[in-house]
Image (cartoon, rainbow, N blue to C red):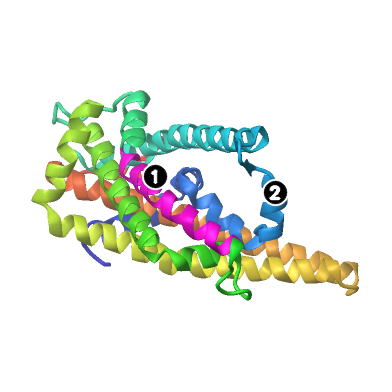
Amino acid sequence: MTGGPLGGALRLTLGAPGLWAVGLAGFLARGGIVAFALPIVVLPSVVGLITFIGPNSVTAAGLAPRFVAIVATVTAGLIAWIVVATIVAAATDLALVGAVVRGTANRSTPGVRTPGPTTVFVIRLVSLVPFALGVALGGVRLGQVGYQELILPSNGSSHFVIRVLQGAPEVVALLLVTWLVTELIGAIAVRLAIVEGRTAAGSLGRSPAWIVRRPLRSLVVVAGTVIGSILVLAPAVIVAGTAWDVVRTALLGDAGPFVDVVAVVLFVAVWTIALVLAGIVATWRSAAWSLAVVGDHRGGGPMDRGDGTL
């Protein structure tokens, strides 16, 4: 990882700590907050799910009004989250990609300009279609497996969610593939809009062709950024979860206030380090894709983070 877009992105990222917070915001908005919340959130049990949904949600007359209200509320919440997350992602794209483009693209190139936030928002929203289709197709299968696990659990020692995922590995694979396709198309399209000054439709339309013409570069960047992210973030999240277990054990036990304070301080320190690493990784991933696209329009110059030259 010493050369090419990955190595160049690492050098740019380590030299621009001011962008790490921007990268972290984009990472959390795109779903990273779920990864950081899982170690400290207790997943509901089967009994808890049934109690929440209600034992009479499905009757001979059809779906109960309470169940319909729950589904409508959850759906509205997810849509609102997607819209807000896409807005935040668009803003972070403009900041992160713009920093690389301003520093590496040839300033005499007439096509290099910053598109409006609406253009980037539309690109990110439309690029979610492959993943949305994967969720729609896989959701039916997950529902079938989930219902089967509710009435006849396959393994009483495993959590309900784990059993459902284990019972539908093809759905997990489908969601993974569609997520990678979404990330790939969206990442390229956003950068084409910024580098070449294209519209949202033009960028989305050209993105697949760009990938097909550069399969090796696309594969190296997508594999490198995904593997690198896992190698850095997975241990960080695991350690943060372990630190939370220490806090919970200390607070529920009788070790004394001093131990409680030490445990909380340790957890906050570990959690902060994990968030910083997430910001660095997110900034690195964005810079890698930016350099991959800017490589076709290379001019020269230092990286500009917006408030100074790096």
The x and y percentages for residue 196 are 17, 32
Q: Secondary structure at mark 1?
A: helix
According to the picture, the residue beneath numbered tag 1 turns out to be 136
Position of residue 292 in the picture relative to residue 225 (left or right): left
Report the amino acid beneath label 1.
Ala
Q: Nearer the viewer, residue 150 or 9?
A: 150
The quadrant of the image that shows the N terminus is bottom left
Q: Nearer the viewer, residue 43 or 282?
A: 43
The x and y percentages for residue 295 are 16, 48
The alpha-carbon separation of the residues under discs 2 and 1 comes to 25 Å
CB of mark 2 within 8 Å of CB of mark 1?
no
Residue 51: within the magenta? no
Q: Would you say the magenta stretch is mainly helix, strand or loop?
A: helix
Rendering quarter of residue 61: top right
Q: Residue at x 51, y 47 (%)?
A: 28
Rendering quarter of residue 171: bottom left
Report the amino acid beneath label 2.
Pro
> Magenta span covers which residues?
127-150
Q: Of marks 2 and 1, which one's residue comes earlier in the chain? A: 2
Q: Residue furthest left?
A: 213
> Above or below — where is 99 with respect to 24?
above
Q: Secondary structure at mark 2?
A: loop
Q: Residue at x 37, y 30 (%)?
A: 121
Q: Residue at x 31, y 39 (%)?
A: 127
According to the picture, the residue beneath numbered tag 2 turns out to be 55
